[in-house]
Image (cartoon, rainbow, N blue to C red):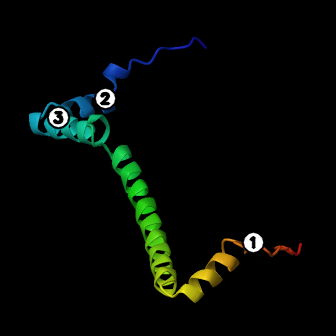
């Protein structure tokens, strides 16, 4: 059995493809589609990447809005001097000059 070289250019399938792409409209549409999908600056891959980044940014924005609301509520509560002292002692661990603070943590 000698290995026979198959000439792809003489196959009937290749001839059908060539005949199909000889139509200038089909060729133009095919080239434009390939360019638009893969070669352009705004190709499919960059659009998908931009959409993923946009989704992450929207999720971060929701989280930041929640934090902003919490901080605004705390700030409104701190308008009174008694709540300001309580916040400083509990959250920021401030102390008076004549007292010691012991922090107890459970594992």
Residue at 63% across / 76% down in the picture?
88
Q: CA distance from mark 1 to mark 2?
A: 91 Å
Q: Position of residue 100 (x, y in %)?
A: 83, 73
Classed neighbour count for the residue bearing mark 3: other residues with Cα under 10 Å, few (<14), some (14–19), many (≥20): few
Classed neighbour count for the residue bearing mark 2: other residues with Cα under 10 Å, few (<14), some (14–19), many (≥20): few
Write down the residue under mark 1.
Answer: 97
Q: Position of residue 5 (x, y in %)?
A: 47, 14
Mark 2 or mark 1, which is nearer the start of the sequence?
A: 2
Q: Residue furthest left?
A: 24
* Disc number for residue 27: 3
Q: CA distance from mark 3 to mark 2?
A: 15 Å
Mark 3 or mark 1, which is nearer the start of the sequence?
A: 3
Write down the residue under mark 2.
Answer: 14
**Front in this rendered view, residue 60 or 48:** 60
Front tag of 3 and 2: 3
Q: CA distance from mark 1 to mark 3?
A: 84 Å
Mark 2 or mark 3, which is nearer the start of the sequence?
A: 2
Residue 96 placement, left or right of 33: right
- Asked if residue 26 is positioned above or below residue 73 in the image, the reply reads above
Quarter of the image where one finds residue 24: top left
Residue at 43% across / 73% down in the picture?
65
Q: Position of residue 42 (x, y in %)?
A: 27, 43
- Can you say which quadrant of the picture contains the C terminus? bottom right
Q: Position of residue 97 (x, y in %)?
A: 75, 71
**Front in this rendered view, residue 65 or 46:** 65
Q: Residue furthest front?
A: 98
- Can you say which quadrant of the picture contains the N terminus? top right
């Amino acid at each position: 059995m000698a290995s026979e070289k198959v000439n792809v250019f003489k196959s009937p399938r290749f001839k059908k493809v060539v005949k199909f792409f000889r139509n200038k409209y089909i060729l133009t549409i095919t080239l434009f589609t390939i360019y638009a999908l893969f070669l352009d600056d705004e190709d499919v891959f960059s659009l998908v990447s931009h959409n993923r980044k946009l989704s992450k940014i929207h999720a971060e924005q929701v989280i930041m809005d929640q934090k902003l609301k919490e901080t605004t509520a705390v700030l409104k509560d701190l308008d009174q001097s008694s709540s300001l002292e309580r916040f400083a002692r509990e959250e920021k661990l401030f102390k008076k000059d004549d007292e010691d603070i012991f922090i107890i943590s459970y594992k």
